[in-house]
Amino acid sequence: MGLALDELIKTAREAVAPSIPSADGLPRPGGVDPLGLRQLNFELMDATLPGVNNVVRLIRPYVVVAWAARRAGQLSDEAKVPATPPMIRDFIDRIEVLYAWSQFALADGGSIDGLPGRRVLTTNHLTRKTYRFGGETWEAFRKTRTGSTAFTAAITYGPSIKALDWAGPSRPPAWGPSPRVQAALDAFEASIASVLDHPAFSRFGTVTVARADVEAWGPLWSLDDPTAAEQEAFAQTLAGDGAKASRRRTMELVRSLIEAEPDQSLSELRAAMSELDGDDPARKDWRRLQVRQAFRLALEAWFWWCLCQLEAGPLPTSELVARFRSKCDDWAAADRPGGWLKAPRIRCPVELQESLSVALKSNVDRVPVEVARTLAFCFMEADTEGDAAPERADRLPLRRARLEARGWSAATPRDFLAHMLHTWLFAQHAYWSAGRGMAEVRARRSAILRLRVALDEGGWRLTRVGSRNARPYATEDRLETVCQLASQCGLFD
């Protein structure tokens, strides 16, 4: 845990001589999103496929949580003394763990890989003959799952379960089921009716469960065998009349393209969805997302390439620009002013993302070429964003980039590249690194050393060994997620 600001001040005041701080008190290197550009990607994803993320891939976690919430409510209503919200929450957590335990014990690979919690359950449950749901061990385990591998965790299915209206915190901090999915829950319950008298399904408080029972339950509520009622309910919440209009439009586009070309790959589908069509709002929103993805990846790739150049020692801006231009063969290598405003040959943002990704993985010398042509494409594409919602200027929206590109149209490529390097890369990086670092200190969270490059007498210098960090990559856009969900609920194969 890094030292908070008040702790640093206190330590400095009390010091009587110079000293070396302990390793525990030092900020740790790290940090993703070096330019602060990824949030706009997520906002654009929410404009096309709201309510899902890149984790949700299976129907059954939605059903299990909603059914557990309904079952807990029924047991509470039947009890002489109604259950408290913590008791209901404990029951839901128990059902989640029993379900995941039974599925991990039942099979390996396949769909099971999309279920969160394999590693932690392997450690805590799969090798035990019995497990006691209650007491300090269970409470500690529940606490570790809450923010990580629980179905209701914010980084797994939790937000989507609420957004698709399967269940929600109607009895804080417990959950209740949605009236819209009662038929699906009835069908699910019918499949496990033979075991509902077991204390695990019929009692609040401490319960001991045998592994043999859990393994026997696995086939009854198999992950790969949702009932027709569950499939129908999920299809409605995902893409039916009750779904959000933007997600419904995108899903209609996906389905129409898959029906027209069933054998296309995910990459081909993504590109087909991005084709220009001014009359189709779903295509327009999807293309805008992919253009923003390409723009963000290009700048992060350029920033990463610059850090690679600085590993041997500090370099001035002029040298970084010269090296960049020496690898290019288009407007960036020429001397003609405003060459970056000429329409590029490639008009597919997905193709540009893929070319950038290949260069980052296998041919670093190709990175400048791919960055230059991607930026030129994005400058042209920004002209189509006249009716787009306003975006924060400090996250470098495309319209701001386009305005600056036009404003420098009388300059040489050398000067415009230097401007982008100063403003869009290094200044942008310093702004977000400092802002996030101070926010972490104020919130007394673990301090992370985010700043990777600084200006020194010899030019730009890396701030630490290993500043380069991992290569940038294209952010997943939820298309694979919704295709898997749609396939599970029978919308298409």
Image (tube, grey):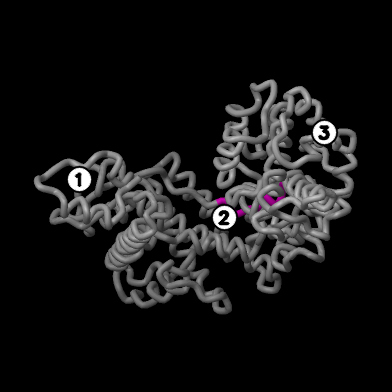
In the rendered image, the quadrant that contains the N terminus is top left
* C-alpha gap between disc 2 and disc 1: 35 Å
In the rendered image, the quadrant that contains the C terminus is top right
Q: Residue at x 67, y 28 (%)?
A: 131
Query: Does residue 404 show up?
Result: yes
The residue at which mark 2 appears reads as 350
Q: Position of residue 237 (x, y in %)?
A: 78, 58
The residue at which mark 1 appears reads as 313
Mark 3 residue type: His
Q: Residues within 10 Å of mark 3 (few under 14, many from 20)?
A: few
The answer to which of 179 and 419 lies nearer the viewer is 179
The answer to which of 418 and 58 lies nearer the viewer is 58
Q: Residues within 10 Å of mark 1 (few under 14, many from 20)?
A: few
Relative to 8, residue 246 above or below: below
Q: Which residues are magenta?
A: 476-485
**In this rendering, the label closer to the viewer, 3 or 2:** 3
Mark 2 residue type: Val
Q: Number of labelled discs?
A: 3
Residue 476 left/right relative to 470: right
Is 478 inside the magenta-drawn segment?
Answer: yes
* C-alpha gap between disc 3 and disc 2: 52 Å
Is 18 inside the magenta-drawn segment?
Answer: no
Mark 1 residue type: Gly
The residue at which mark 3 appears reads as 198
Q: Position of residue 288 (x, y in %)?
A: 57, 66
Residue 345 left/right relative to 69: left
Q: Residues within 10 Å of mark 2 (few under 14, many from 20)?
A: many
What secondary structure do most residues of the magenta stretch adopt? helix
